[in-house]
Amino acid sequence: MSARISIIRLIGTSALALSIAACGAFGPERTPPQMASPVRYTAKDQSLEMPAAASGTAQHLRAGARPVPEWWKEYGSDALDALVDEGLENSPSLAAAQSTLKAAREGLRAQIGQSLWPNVDVGFSPSRQRALAIPTLPQQTFLYNIFAAEVKTSYTFDFFGAAVLADRALARQVQQQEYQLESVRRALAANIVVATINAASVQEQVAATEELVALGERRAQQTAARYALGSASLDDSLAAQEDAATAAAALPPLRAQALAVRHAQAVLLGRTPDQAPAPLPLNTLRLPDTVPVSVASDLLHQRPDILAAEAGVRAAADEAGAATAAMFPSLTLSASYGRGGFDWSTFSSPAGAIWSVGASLTQPLFHGGALAARKHQYEANYSAAVSQYRQTVLAAFQNVADTLVSLEEDANTLAQSERAANAARDMDRDAEARYHLGASPLDAALTARQQYESASVQYVRARAARLSDTAALFVSMGNPPAGGPGAGQPAAGEPAGGAAAAALIGLQR
């Protein structure tokens, strides 16, 4: 039995070697097209030193640095790290993507086992039948038993690599799903970070707006009292009421936005909306002082979306090659061995031995143009995959460029917002001091405080925008190049199913 298994393995390995050798003769170029790397990402020179606010961090962009895998830890918040870990562990969308990838891997193993290895089946078919007899016999029908048991095997020699190319195309598609899973994982982490930043920001905006509403109402009441005493005009009183009502009208949508952000954050974490975590204080999220910016040529080998598009090009090329190879001959060998007889004694005796061997050589001649049409179909799919790869690379460059510009302008906005907030704070302190000294009316002090709260809201928004765009830049850099599933190797604990499967899943370029 072991000798037969060795022979089967030898046949399978030899056929696989012949098939792989023939694979290079069919199909278009499997290497994605060369893309010109831009000298710089943006349309203008990009400074590596971001403008710093008076009390802010002087953020530095490190050109040519490697991406950071767990980049959210750069914010220096254990609470944020815990939220991201929870989301990556409990997110249903990520779990669905992982299960889809597992199903694709098992489908690949099934196809490899079906196409590259001999099929061996065991059958036992006892039966009792009544059949017609010879007309000259007095008995028109008779009963008899049949006992048959066989081991059957067959193998198709893939001399021109049609099966190998089809399997390799499917393996590329599995690799593409691996990169897409990584994109989903990184997008989930980014969405959790941004949702946490937004929840903290909107919560502080709500608090500042509530103070604005209270100040507006107090100022309206004070102006109405002055009007009743004749020290203020009716227009002043009505204008103060309008300002108070306008401020109060801005509060309900802001509160609704705060709850909506928290609900979205809860769903990202795999929780129900009523279990949304409490917003973190915005000042507990430290702005990362250093952000890596890879050169454009390295970006092609780091971003999961580009790597997925590259795998799509290779898969389409292999599919086109398989369609071409299917137009050439194939040889199938079959054999069976077993025992049979019309009674149990014959079945179990040496006289009951039965066997068969056969060969079938098939050359497609006419299929109504189906084979040629299928070849042209996959060639068109390949052209589309190449164009999609080019578009993905260009979109990646645009994404990095837009993020760099946004981050630089965020830094400028934050610096000016802080400057405005500091000036409004000083004005508020000065107006408050003058009011207590009797040098200015209460109305002036209330107005100064309103201006300070309004400036504080703008400052909070600017801080949140810079934190969020920093996260976007981290994500746009992709992953550090490394081995593992993302490099086309089977995952740990995932048996490849034999040498042939390992050779295909390994995807030697």
Image (spheres, grey):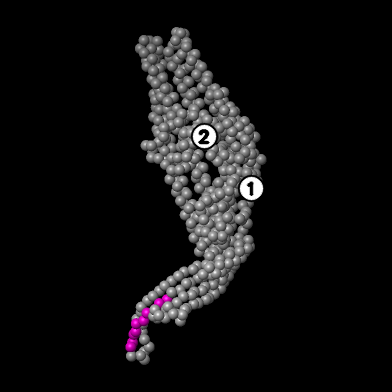
Q: Position of residue 41 (x, y in %)?
A: 62, 39
Residue farthest to the right?
39
Residue 26, located in which quarter of the rendered image? bottom right
Depth check, front residue: 18 or 354 = 354
Q: Which residue is mark 1?
A: 35
Whether residue 260 appears in this view of the structure is no
Query: Within 10 angstroms of label 1, few (less than 14), some, or many (20 or more) residues?
Result: few
Q: Secondary structure at mark 1?
A: loop
Q: Earlier in the sequence, mark 2 or mark 1?
A: 1
Question: What range is drawn magenta here?
Answer: 139-148
Q: Which residue is mark 2?
A: 468
Depth check, front residue: 309 or 157 = 157
Q: Position of residue 345 (x, y in %)?
A: 40, 80
Residue, x 42% and y 30% (percent of image)?
254
In space, the residues marked 2 and 1 are separated at their CA atoms by 30 Å
Amino acid type indicated by mark 1: Met
Reply above or below: 446 against 4: above
Residue, x 35% and y 90% (percent of image)?
137
Q: Which mark is residue 372?
A: none
Q: Position of residue 33 (x, y in %)?
A: 63, 51
Residue 480 part of the magenta segment: no
Whether residue 507 appears in this view of the structure is yes
On screen, residue 199 versus residue 326, left or right, reads: left
Amino acid type indicated by mark 2: Ser
Quadrant location, the C terminus: bottom right
Residue, x 52% and y 33% (percent of image)?
75
Query: Within 10 angstroms of label 2, few (less than 14), some, or many (20 or more) residues?
Result: many
Depth check, front residue: 350 or 484 = 350
Q: Position of residue 306 (x, y in %)?
A: 57, 47
Residue, x 64% and y 47% (percent of image)?
35
Residue 141 part of the magenta segment: yes
